Amino acid sequence: MDTGQSAQVTDMGGEHSAGVSAVERERGDVPSPCPPAKQRSLRVVYVLNDGLKSVMASSPESGALQCLQRACDSESALLTTVTFGRLDFGETSVLDSFYDADIAVVDMSDVFRQPSLFYHLGVRESFDMANNVILYNDTDPDTAQSLKDMVAQKNTKANRSPALGFPWVQLPPEYRGSGLCNKASSGNYYFIPYIVTPNHEYMCCESDAQRRASEYMQPSWDNLLSPLCVPLTDRFTSLLKDIHVTSCASFKDTLLNDIRKAREKYQGEELAKELSRIKLRIDNTEVLTQDIVMNLLFSYRDIQDYDAMVKLVETLEMLPTCDLATQPMIQFHYAFALNRRNTPGDREQALEVMLQVLQSCEHPAPDMFCLCGRIYKDIFLDSDCKDTINRDNAIQWYRKGFELQPTLYSGINLAVLLIVAGQQFESSIELRKIGVRLNSLLGRKGSLEKMNNYWDVGQFFTVGMLANDIPKATQAAEKLFKLKPPIWYLRSVVQNLQLIQRFKKQTVEHSPQRERLNFWMDIIVEATQGTTERLRFPVLILEPTKVYQPSYVSINNEAEEKNVSIWHVSPAETKGIHEWTFTAMSIKGISISKFDERCCFLYVHDNSDDFQIYFSTEEQCGRFCSMVKEMISDGTGNAVELEGEGDGDTLEYEYDTDETGDRVVLGRGTYGVVYAGRDVSNQVRIAIKEIPERDS
């Protein structure tokens, strides 16, 4: 019997630890195009519905995943897990892992997530990766029968139709069934409904008779049910045995691995140049498949090279024998890139592309509705919020996406636009319903303290602002700053926050909490504005207690004696000194941190502690440091610096001393004395152990 509870599932960034190194070896050791490669292990990917926290609990999904893990162990298959949120968000590494796996396993027990999961399964089909397993915790006979009918229809139709919501991409004949494809050997959908017995055993009941028998189960009937149902682990094992891998060292595989390696190795302009070199190799070969094109699009998207995305798709459109550019997934990213590039006419063209895609899909993915909403929203914003027709169009499309599959992204945008349209939470039933749903979705992600994804934290921040929950919004803003999100994401967050502040009815409140929230808005908004000429900066000062103190710092060039001023936000809440002014003569030097280029160290005379100051961006930090160095210049153009510039191998340090000037002792051991000190280059506190030399 299969309890489904004995194996411990571990997670390393979304992957089982046993599979990570093997997957990396598989991708990292790319063979040359021609020599025969030995058979590799099957790659299996499983989509977690609720993240690792719930899976570790005694949920049905937990037991089903553990059954799959044991089956993979017995057949030497490599199992990787990805979370639904990261897949639905479109994180490049997660999409790549899901689309590239030989077998994809998804649990359809949550009906709200079915549209997105079906969409991503359809994209796998377009890559010729068509071994897809649909699990369902058999609690509703109608849903189970609907899924069973859908799978049967998929498996019996020779021509996979997009009518079921799976956007099937018809590859050119020379690429189908050829040795160029590295995929599982036979394309099938497998529907596996499972039940959990009163004794916590996981059984697969695929026939109607089995299912009816399971409805009347009692704890003592497990032995009677065994002949009718198959243990879920055994069903998985049988499935893995039936699916084989055709492994070929093809040029296509080499290109895919080169794209992945480039993403890992390069960033920004260097990545763009490397992708251009890879694209030239594709232009000179006949190997041009949708997975290669999508990997290029994902890579360009990650570095915000929207012009390259547009030009890649438009190049495909000009190839007479290639119809890849017309496929829904590529058209979706083409419209996304047009909207983001935003040259004259781009947004109108993006809208036209998306409306055509929606006309051709009977069951489009929620993201398609949301992209239409985003395009209309951007057109509305371009009009300085005066184009109410496009505002209402954006509301309509976001509402469709939210109704089809409630997500934080669609719900937040819908709520913000409804507020812009004049609705308020106090009087709008729709807004209150959206608010309840948003808080429920946030609750599924766990507490703010355990969130480590800037996307989740940014949504937490925005929901807090929508609800006027100042403590929650302030905590989320601080967490968001620590995660160092990309500027393009901060711009998206700021855009919604500014709309909320502009159109939401605000309560007039002056309090230390409100002042701190205003500070966080100031520092996050400044991060999106690039280099400015302002001499006043919102900053965070890291206190010796490891607490980030919201503060402001300013350069006073107009004063009789130039100086730097620092003051804390909400000084009434703090004890002791909370405001300082340092003239050029009282500043020893300044250096930028080697660990975070948003941070600098300001060294001053007559102060027990130097200042560790965090700015909104690296550019603002660098600009402040340059102005301070100019201020304390010795007149010959050489500023007094403490940056520890050496050969990189020598540690420069200094001892901490007490009031009497004696070195601070941390401890004494058999071999020597341990003193407190600091690394001069970054002012990080260190322990210095002195061991007396002995004659040999």
Image: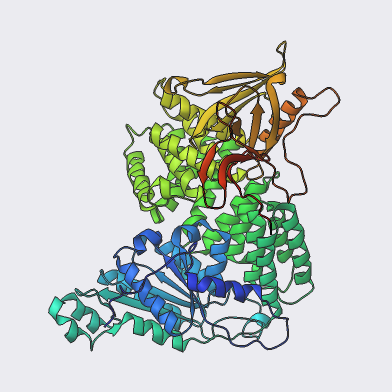
Quarter that holds the N terminus: bottom left
Percent of width and height locating residue 261:
67, 66
Horizontal and vertical percent position of residue 520: 51, 32
Of residues 38 and 243, the one nearer the viewer is: 38
**Up-down relation of residue 39 to residue 574 (above or below):** below
Residue 300 % position (x, y) = 67, 57
Q: Is residue 694 above or below residue 208?
A: above
Residue occupying image coordinates x 35% and y 64%: 56
Question: Residue drawn at (57%, 63%), measured in percent from left and top?
Answer: 93
Q: In this image, 172 relative to 421: left or right? A: right
Q: Nearer the viewer, residue 625 or 311?
A: 625
Question: Taking the image as drawn, is residue 339 in sight?
Answer: yes
Work out which residue is located at the far front of the displayed protein and give it. 695
From what the image shows, is residue 11 above or below residue 536? below
Q: Quadrant of the C terminus?
A: bottom right
Query: Quick check: 343 left or right of 483?
Result: right
**Depicted 43 relative to depicted 638: above or below:** below
